Image: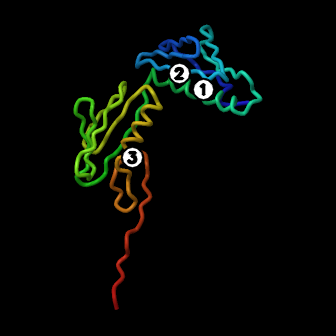
Amino acid sequence: MSRVGKQPVAITDKVKITQADSVLTVKGPKGALTLDIHPLVSIDIDEGAKQVKVIPRNETVKECKAIWGMTRSLLQNMVTGVVSPFERRLEVVGIGYGASLSGNTLSLSVGFAKDVKLPVPEGMEVVIPNPNMIQLKCADKQKIGHFAAVIRMTKPPEPYNGKGIKYAEEVIKRKAGKAFVGGG
């Protein structure tokens, strides 16, 4: 039995869930998201109890248990995201390093000969309160996590000086540089 999959997903009055064939659509005040349902699970929408349950087709198959819990987690993230969007913050650390936004393009100046330009995915809001901070907001947790990882990959933080792009809550383990040994 999947402990995660057994729990129902609560629905608020602001959220509307519909199912057409194997596609589940979740609509809310902050957007609409869709999910393709795997054939090993089915979805039971209970309007009266204001909850959605994910039901496995065969509980004895190991793959079915994994898909059961994962589908329930994806559904919970969708319901949460359409009500209050997910937020991710990144810090740009280094002298001369910075970020800017022009239209739908994020420009990163991180020590390369040219600025790195990344197109902002549709449905995502990018805010740059200062050149060393990037804030991402989106209803889709997978999309925001992927875009934050792409931004971080352009210049990951290095352990000696700590320069690069890091998540705001990330702690960089610093290494000591070469120690000077006096001749004698």
Q: Label 2 is placed on what type of residue?
A: Leu
Q: Label 1 is placed on what type of residue?
A: Thr
Colouring mode (rainbow / by chain / secondary structure / one colour): rainbow
Q: Residue at x 37, y 24 (%)?
A: 123
* Marks 2 and 1 in Cβ contact (< 8 Å): yes
Residue 116 is situated, as x and y percent measured from the top left of the image, at 28, 43
Classify residue 124 as left or right of residue 78. Answer: left
Q: Label 3 is placed on what type of residue?
A: Met
Image mark for residue 35? 2
Q: Crowding near pointer 2: few (<14 within 10 Å), some, many (20+)? A: some
Mark 3 or 1, nearer chain start: 1
Q: Residue at x 27, y 30 (%)?
A: 104
Q: Secondary structure beneath disc 3? A: helix
Mark 3 or 2, nearer chain start: 2
Q: Crowding near pointer 3: few (<14 within 10 Å), some, many (20+)? A: few
Classify residue 60 as left or right of residue 11. Answer: right
Q: Quadrant of the N terminus?
A: top right
Q: Secondary structure beneath disc 2? A: strand
* Marks 3 and 2 in Cβ contact (< 8 Å): no
Q: Quadrant of residue 73?
A: top right
Real-space Cα distance between discs 3 and 2? 27 Å
Decide: is 138 above or below 130.
above
Residue at label 3? 153
Residue at label 1? 71
Mark 2 or 1, nearer chain start: 2
Real-space Cα distance between discs 3 and 1? 28 Å
Q: Secondary structure beneath disc 1? A: helix
Q: Crowding near pointer 1: few (<14 within 10 Å), some, many (20+)? A: many
Residue 9 is situated, as x and y percent measured from the top left of the image, at 59, 21
Residue 133 is situated, as x and y percent measured from the top left of the image, at 30, 42
Classify residue 104 as left or right of residue 46. Answer: left
